[in-house]
Image (tube, rainbow, N blue to C red):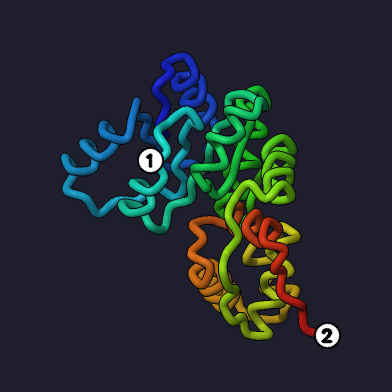
């Protein structure tokens, strides 16, 4: 967890330590402190989930993804005003949680959803991304890459917010294959996360047709 505000960091740490299924927890004030701890232990460690604040610098997600490419990023959104929602959208996290919604139960369910490959997104963030997509504030992609028929099926399910396991069950493929297809789809549009991908598809109005 990366959180500069001590009262929030300590409160989150207390709740996270009550979740018995979490085996390892590290709390740091900033990314420099995290990377320092990583260097001290000689590397070779990656978190399943990294929790960050939307008030963190914009480039923090890029730094984290380069260092921990398999980790999922959960962003804590402080307020539902346009300024904070815009900061949250720029991070392209894998999931979001409003600070005022945080309880031990919501933290537990959100983290479990992230690990399952789902995309937790509270209504204020989802509405902001949709409004931004409809307004055309973000430049459109010049072209859409080719998606195979199977990838189009996967995209339709991604837009419904399904996890990798749910996609595998719906399409009738293995979990490994579902993960591979999701990764391929995101790579083709250079999207760092599911949330970013969904917003990008809706923004560009380029959702490919599903097989019949």
In percent of width and height, residue 20 lies at 52, 37
Q: Which residue corresponds to the image point at 51% horizontal and 60% vertical from the top-left?
A: 191
> Please, what secondary structure does the residue beneath circle 2 have?
loop
Q: Are marks 2 and 1 in contact (CB under 8 Å)?
A: no
Quadrant for residue 61, please give it: top left
In percent of width and height, residue 101 lies at 68, 27
In percent of width and height, residue 76 lies at 55, 32
Separation of marks 2 and 1 at Cα, in angstroms: 41 Å
Mark 1, residue position: 60
- Observer able to see residue 103: no
- Report the quarter where the C terminus lies: bottom right
N-terminal-most mark, 2 or 1: 1
- Report the quarter where the N terminus lies: top left
Disc sitting over residue 203 in the figure: none
Q: Vertical placement of 11 versus 124: above or below?
A: above
Mark 2, residue position: 212
């Amino acid at each position: 967890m990366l959180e500069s505000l001590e009262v929030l960091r300590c409160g989150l740490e207390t709740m996270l330590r009550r979740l018995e299924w979490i085996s390892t927890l590290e709390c740091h004030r900033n990314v420099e402190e995290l990377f320092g701890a990583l260097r001290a232990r000689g590397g070779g460690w990656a978190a399943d989930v990294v929790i960050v604040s939307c008030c963190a610098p914009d480039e923090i997600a890029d730094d984290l993804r380069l260092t921990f490419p398999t980790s999922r990023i959960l962003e804590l959104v402080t307020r539902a005003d346009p300024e904070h929602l815009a900061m949250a959208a720029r991070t392209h996290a894998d999931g979001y949680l409003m600070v005022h919604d945080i309880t031990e139960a919501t933290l537990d369910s959100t983290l479990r959803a992230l690990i399952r490959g789902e995309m937790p997104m509270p209504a204020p963030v989802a509405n902001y991304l949709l409004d931004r997509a409809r307004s055309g504030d973000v430049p459109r992609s010049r072209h859409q890459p080719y998606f195979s028929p199977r990838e189009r099926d996967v995209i339709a399910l991604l837009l419904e917010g399904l996890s990798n396991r749910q996609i595998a069950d719906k399409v009738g493929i293995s979990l490994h294959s579902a993960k591979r297809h999701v990764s391929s789809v995101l790579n083709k549009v250079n999207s760092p996360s599911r949330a970013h991908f969904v917003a990008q598809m809706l923004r560009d109005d380029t959702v490919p047709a599903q097989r019949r």
